[in-house]
Amino acid sequence: MRENKEEIPGEEHIREMASKPQRHDSSNSDPGEQQALRLRRVSSPVSTNNYPLFNWSSTPAGEDEEGNSRPHRDLRSIPLPMALKRAVRQVQQMHVPVVSRMESWKRNKTKSLRKLKDNAREFHYIFTLWSKSLQKIGGNFGGGVQSYFVFLRFLVVLNFFSFLLIAGFVLIPSIVFRSVGTTLTNSSGPEKCMNYDPNPQGLVVFYNYFLNLLSGTGFMEYSYLFYGYYNNTMAGDRTFSYNIPLAYLFTVVFYFAFCLICIIARMGTAARVAVATGGSAGGNYSMMVFTGWDYGCMADQATKLKQKTIHYRLQVDLEEERIQKRAAALTSSQKIILYSIRFLMCFIAFGLIIASFYGIFVATNFSQEKSGQEGFLGLFFEYLPSIVITTGNFLVPLLCDQIALIEQYAPSTTIILALLRAVFLRLVSLGVLLFTLWRQITCEGQTNSGTCKLCQYNYEVYPCWETRVGQEMYKLTLFDFLINIAVLALVEFPRRMVVDNSSSKVAQWVGRQEFMVPSNVLGLVYGQTVVWTGALFCPLLPLINTIKFVFLFYCKKVTLFYNCRPALKTFRSTTSTFFFLVVLLFGWGLAILVMIYSLAEIHPSMGCGPFRFFPYMWSIVPTSFYSLSKTTQEFLFFIGSQAFSIPLFVLSCVVMCYFIALTSVYGKSVALLRAQLKLEGRDKQFLVKQIEELSRLQIPKHNAGVQD
């Protein structure tokens, strides 16, 4: 289609506006230069100034004379004065293009898709969990504290979808098919191994319901909360059947796989943000100055929050750069002294962690020996391991924080080191608890001797050992939540009231507390690791953890705004967010080891649970496999054979190498661009100095000419 080339009123005026800056520049030059510029303008068939020419009668999706479509260049991306852009837009709006029906349909479709995309983005922002609260937290306390609450929101969503997965494939089918299902196998073991009846009989004192709620025994034990209540049944007919034990096993396996995929995807996003923002101090100031502001901020409160956020980011970069310069200025003897102090402090911190492990081991053994007690004393003995673990997790990191002050690391390095120590303490303390329970369940690993010989596990103390492990994880989760509520009500609020209303020197010296990100993040990682560890034995634990984390978010938000002051030392949120997920991955690794060992090594309880008649939990898989049709068996055999696995492995290696090479290329490109920015900055500084020197030389000559 040939476009209309008629002139439109106002175009000459706009062209004059575009040419004004250049005529102004040429008026200050020499006559010879002006003549050269005239010759250059005459000889140039393209343009008469530095600004791009517009086809005033063109449309954004116009076509040239040959019918080929030209790529549309957005007016906002062209370097023109705002007045000229406004005039160009008015001229383009005055012009009515002659287009075909297909072209008009394409434009309307593009506009509709863009509007739909904008509406979807607004809808997602409105229904994003706690978006306004996170923006307010980031503006008042910096990105480091905000990263904790973002991490907490991620765990809430992860646990909620995990509960939906478990409820859809295990809980609801177990409720529906409980009365109509048939038992898979009727093989019976020793009668002593089958004695398990947690259902309370007769009258029960009222306060026992409260004790049962806290300890997970009694009516809580005889519910869908724990492993022992689920049956080994299969419901359906020839056309449809649902295997409850197989669904139970595969749901737990897919639950762990789902959590791993979510963590890795989140780590990829955090890594991209860290690479895009620099990930280290220095070189980010210009990016923050020129690209850090959000021009969508219209309200006063949003503007102030954005200003505070940029202020905290600049403060972090300046603080880390100052520490790096101070470390670079140390002499050899000062470095030797500093490294010696760090080694000694690390040894002391490791000794404190080992002492905490020993206390957990002793407390767990003592608790299991006194497990027959009743009443509040029995409740205390049952919670004794949880009390010791919580005490160690509170005192040891507190002492390690004081040790970190002597080590004199950078703020981000201090955060990472504190996280490493605390995660080692919390995860290994949980491992010590599980190891102690394993020793008692399996008779210290000797299942063919003593009380374990008859049932392959200690049936006298643990008639349903899976439920007992689930109860321990349930008590750890509940006790951790109660401790957080108690600290908020009995420690943090009274401290704030004393500091605000007292004028004593002690109160002013103590001051309001700081929001310690490392310890709070480790609390989340510890709680999530407990849930992963107990998911096989307490399927509804993700739901409990979701409710716990929702309450914890509001409790931490209240204590942050009412009881805490902004941190004196800030740290980078981009690298810390990535490291939070790495620490969470460590907890997932510990939980997956516990699950694999429980599935493949320990004999299931014979009196409870969906695997009561199998030698191992994993035995349900080959049993169900051989009940499939021959075609399905051959297909699954092919998937597990070398003919399928080796090409799949090779393809995975090729794809991984491709992404590694792509990442390397992107990293080199980013490094080259940063180096180019630094060189351009130096060139500009050099040109500014040259201009200053030339101006100094020309001023005396001008004064001498005036005097002559």
Image (cartoon, rainbow, N blue to C red):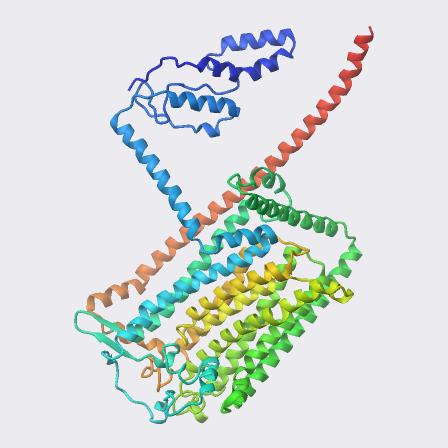
Q: Position of residue 132 (x, y in %)?
A: 50, 52
Residue 416, compared with residue 246, is above or below; it is above
Q: Can you name the residue that lies furthest to the left here? A: 238
Q: Residue at x 62, y 10 (%)?
A: 33
Q: Nearer the viewer, residue 285 or 309?
A: 309
Q: Is residue 237 left or right of residue 139?
A: left
Residue 139, compared with residue 236, is above or below; it is above
Which image quadrant is residue 704 in? top right
Q: Position of residue 433 (x, y in %)?
A: 53, 79
Q: Is residue 297 visible?
A: yes
Q: Is residue 80 visible?
A: no
Residue 151, compared with residue 314, is above or below; it is below
Q: Position of residue 13 (x, y in %)?
A: 48, 14
Q: Can you name the residue that lies furthest to the right here? A: 707
Q: Nearer the viewer, residue 466 or 24?
A: 24
Quadrant for the C terminus, please.
Answer: top right
Q: Can you name the residue that lies furthest to the front here? A: 501
Q: Position of residue 585 (x, y in %)?
A: 50, 63
Q: Residue at x 26, y 25 (%)?
A: 100
Quadrant for the N terminus, please.
Answer: top left
Q: Is residue 178 left or right of residue 411?
A: left
Which image quadrant is residue 114 in? top left
Q: Residue at x 39, y 91 (%)?
A: 203
Residue 510, compared with residue 470, is above or below; it is above
Q: Nearer the viewer, residue 253 or 671?
A: 253
Which image quadrant is residue 4 in? top left
Q: Nearer the viewer, residue 697 or 145?
A: 145
